[in-house]
Amino acid sequence: MTALTPDLHTTEPGDLDPESVFWEARPELAAVRQYARAAVASPWAVLGCVLARVSLSVPPSVVLPPLGNDSQAVASLNVFVGLVGPSGVGKGVATAAARGVLDIQPGAGRLIVERPLGSGEGISHMFIDTDSEGEDTPAIHSVWFDVPEVDTLTALVGRKASTLSSEVRKMFSGEGLGFQNSDPTRRKIVPSHAYRAAIVAGVQPLKAGPLLDDAAGGTPQRFLWLPATDPGAPDVAPPAPEPLSWSSPVLATQHARTHLNVAESVRAVLRAERLARLREQITDDNGQQSLVRLKVAALLALLARRTDVTESDWQLADYVMTVSDHTRTRMRDALRADAAQAVRARAEARAAFDEHHDTAAVERTARKILSKLDTEPVSATTVRRALGPALRDYFEAATDDLIRRGLVERNDDVYHGQPRTRLRRRQ
């Protein structure tokens, strides 16, 4: 494998050379990029969808090992991917391309079914089948939850008494799903690590605010954010490579708990971070990001048909997370710029409104002044007092306007040692 250089972590993702270190690190990554560009799709978006398909193709019994000595503290490979780009760019093409990248023969992976994301209560029903005698049994399929537009997800989450957020977060960790209900037809309880799921969402940056704002709940930190755009796309699409012949390195029917073998150097890094958070030495909200990175590393290993997660997988996953962080930052920047533009637009609209009303008030004041004047000079002070409180602030502007229009003549002089101004209608 080509060594990952420091430049890989300091270069903006959009500035990477087409023959970048990351994409050339492994033949399967090079194939993903070529297939994506042949389909005129974003390589990053296609990679995210490929990793989701790998996750769904291995049995739920395959888990990430615990960091401590609690044998039950395992982590699921369930993965959430946000494909970020403007409307009409990339998500549908990327998901279709991902299906073409991997050639998974029947029996080489689990059956994948695509379903829309609905209520929290409905999620558990996706993973329970009913046998011929009416008994509930675990589903033999994995579920790809398709969210074409992120505002659909935020609308569902925002419903009063919605349980979707909590169920989604549990699904990420592989925890048990479902709720107790007196109606047995609605009581679908799914045990922990007995199901496999992925969420793939299309995300328009300016609609992602509610989801990104749920940082306290931890939802955005559970997503891998990847751009659905490709600034380096070639003018001429390359030919599509042959699909990658792939099969799960663990039998799809395997029910016994299988721990992936994570390199000790990686486990040491994760344990050190966990301990620092336990001691409150790290207090940010990004604790889930290390788990997302580990999942990406594990899925890259499984894509290479290995159950050993190596330091190499960990380093490649680090760069994927760099792209994810960059993409999430760009979304936040777009939201801030949009909010600032909205503030400016409101200020300009208010100024235009005030200017319109000021102009109307000046015109009313001018008409009132004319009604008080004759060809004989009248004290400006007297005329101003006759206007009433609502129009007096516009007296000077209205008087100047009448003088410019040649309707009123103004005379300034001194009377009994005091300056005075008099106005009269012009003949």
Image: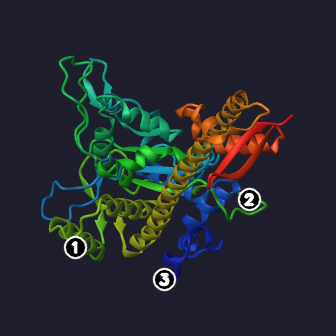
* Residue picked out by circle 1: 272
Q: Residue at x 28, y 63 (%)?
A: 284
Give the image location of residue 278, x and y in percent.
Answer: 16, 65
Residue 77, x across and y down, in percent: 34, 53
Q: Which is nearer the eye, 237 or 349? A: 349
The Cα atoms of the two marked residues, 2 and 3, are separated by 32 Å
- Residue at the disc numbered 3: 6
Q: Which of 236 and 385 is in front in this view?
A: 385
Classify residue 201 as left or right of residue 426: left
Residue 24, horizontal then vertical, whole percent: 58, 73
Query: Who's the residue at 47% across and 49% down the image?
Result: 53
Residue 100 spot, x, y in % from top left: 60, 49
Which mark sits nearer the N-terminus, 2 or 3?
3
| Residue found at the very far right of the displayed protein | 427
Q: Circle 2 is placed at which residue position?
A: 239
Residue at the left extreme, as displayed:
69
